[in-house]
Amino acid sequence: QRTNLTNPTNIKKQDTDRHTEPIASFDTNPLLLYTEEKQTNLTLVMWNANSLRSVHKQGHLLSFLHTTKADIIGFTELRSSMDSILSIPGVRTILEQKGFRYTYWNPSTKNVGQFGTAIISRLRPKEVIFNIGTLNDEGRVISLIFDKFIQILSYSPTLGIDENTQELTKQRRRLDFDEALSLHCRELKTKYK
C-alpha cells in the first residue's frame, strides 16, 4: 500500500488513520528547518518497545522522547494504537518541541494489541509504503522514501519451539516474510537508484 506524500490530496481515505497532521508548523519550531544537506548526517533510532503503553507506564517513553537526539525514531511491537499513544499527557508537546512533525503508524488489524510499527520523523518523506507481501494486516513494515535515502522499519515474525518435540515452528511464515522483505528491498532499489 503506497502513499505519495508530495501532495496531501494523494493520501487515500483509508490511509488517514495512519498519518497524523503535522504536529507543529515551520513558523513555530526552528528544529523543523531541515535542509537537503542535513539528510546526509542523520541519527536514526529503532526501538523494539514490546508495548509503548508499558514503556510509558515504566516511565521511559517521555524521558526517551525528551532526551533523544534522533532525527527519525522507529518503534516495533507497538501493541497499541496511534490515538492511545498520542493521548498520553506530554507526548504531543514533546514531539512538537523536539520537531517530530511527521508520524506514521502501522498497527496490526489482524491481532489488535499485538505487533505494529511506527516511525516519527523530523523530515517529511516523499512517499510512505505500509506493509509487504501477504502480511498486510499485521503492521510489520513501514518504508519511508526520502530524497537521499530510504528508511525501512520491519518487525519480523518470530519462530517458535514446539514444547513436545523441541523443533522450530512457524518456519514457513518467517521464510515468506523474509522473501517478501527481500523482494520489497529489491523493488525499492530498482525504483529509487
Image (cartoon, rainbow, N blue to C red):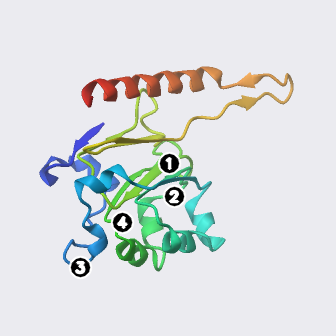
Q: Residue at x 40, y 31 (%)?
A: 132
Which quarter shows the N terminus? top left
Whole-angstrom CA distance, mark 3 to mark 4, is 13 Å
Task: Tell whether 102 sits left or right of 9.
Answer: right
Whether the residues at callouts 3 and 2 have beta carbons within 8 Å, the answer is no
Query: What type is the residue that disc 1 sits on?
Result: Gly
Q: Residue at x 28, y 68 (%)?
A: 32
Query: What type is the residue that disc 3 sits on?
Result: Thr
Whole-angstrom CA distance, mark 3 to mark 1, is 31 Å
Crowd band around label 2 with a 10 angstrom C-alpha radius: few (<14), some (14–19), many (20+): many
Q: Residue at x 15, y 47 (%)?
A: 10
Q: Earlier in the sequence, mark 1 or mark 2?
A: 2
Task: Tell whether 16 sits left or right of 88.
Answer: left
Answer above or below: position of 131 versus 7: above
Q: Which mark is residue 135?
A: none
The x, y position of residue 179, in whole percent, is: 49, 21
Q: Secondary structure at mark 3?
A: loop
The x, y position of residue 192, in whole percent, is: 26, 31
Whole-angstrom CA distance, mark 1 to mark 2, is 8 Å
Q: Residue at x 29, y 23 (%)?
A: 190
> Badge 1 is on which residue?
116
> Badge 4 is on which residue?
100
Q: Earlier in the sequence, mark 2 or mark 4?
A: 2
Q: Secondary structure at mark 1?
A: loop
Query: What type is the residue that disc 4 sits on?
Result: Phe
> Badge 2 is on which residue?
80
> Badge 3 is on which residue?
28
In depth, the one of 168 and 49 nearer the eye is 49
The x, y position of residue 147, in whole percent, is: 25, 44
